[in-house]
Amino acid sequence: MTFDSETIAKSLIAMLSQGKNPVDVAKHLESFIKKHSLAGQIPSIVNYLDVFDGRAKSLDTLKIVGGNKLSNKNLERIKNITGAEIGTQTEINTDRKLMGGFIATYNNVRYDASVKGQIEKLQEALLTNGN
């Protein structure tokens, strides 16, 4: 039987997310690697764990693109709208093409409150209803 590094990394993450003791998981991994002679896969397993960790951190980051510079008051409003908790890592960028408003992404959900987005929705509605 063959074991690929990605599957092993996913199994480790699943075990930890089920609340298993990290020390026990590490011991289990060590005996599994010895039993199946998988020591050569350790760097690849670690690489997959890094990749998965990066994806998880990306989901936890509130990403905001504003049409203009955002005030602290508006930033707090956006955090409330998206459900971002206090201390959530936030990335803020400006894109004048939005013409105002913002687009925020948090936990894989996109919130489009930009002027550009509203114009596009209106245009689509007019074209759809016009046929």
Image (cartoon, grey):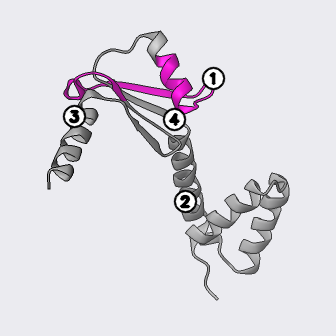
Question: Which picture quadrant has residue 30?
Answer: bottom right
User: Pointer 1: what residue?
Assistant: 86
Within 10 Å of disc 4 (Cα), the crowding (few <14, some 14-19, many 20+) is: some
Q: Earlier in the sequence, mark 3 or mark 2?
A: 2
Residue 48's mark? 2
Left or right for 117, reference 131: right
Kind of residue at disc 3:
Ile
Residue 93 shown in magenta: yes
* Secondary element at tag 2: helix
Q: Nearer the viewer, mark 2 or mark 1?
A: 1
Q: What residue is at 41 percent from the left and 10 percent from the top?
A: 71
Question: Which picture quadrant has residue 97?
Answer: top left
Kind of residue at disc 2:
Tyr
Within 10 Å of disc 2 (Cα), the crowding (few <14, some 14-19, many 20+) is: some
User: Pointer 3: what residue?
Assistant: 119
Left or right for 58, reference 31: left
Which part of the image, by quadrant, shows the C terminus?
bottom left
Q: Give the CA separation, mark 4 to mark 3.
A: 27 Å
Q: Nearer the viewer, mark 3 or mark 2?
A: 3
Q: Position of residue 102 (x, y in %)?
A: 35, 27
* Secondary element at tag 4: loop
Q: Earlier in the sequence, mark 4 or mark 2?
A: 2
Q: Are marks 1 and 4 in contact (CB under 8 Å)?
A: no
Q: Nearer the viewer, mark 1 or mark 3?
A: 3
User: Pointer 4: what residue?
Assistant: 61
**Span shown in magenta:** 75-102
Q: Earlier in the sequence, mark 4 or mark 3?
A: 4
Closer to the camera, 114 or 43?
114
Q: What residue is at 63 percent from the left and 64 percent from the top?
A: 10
Q: Give the CA separation, mark 1 to mark 3.
A: 32 Å
Within 10 Å of disc 1 (Cα), the crowding (few <14, some 14-19, many 20+) is: few
Closer to the camera, 2 or 83?
83
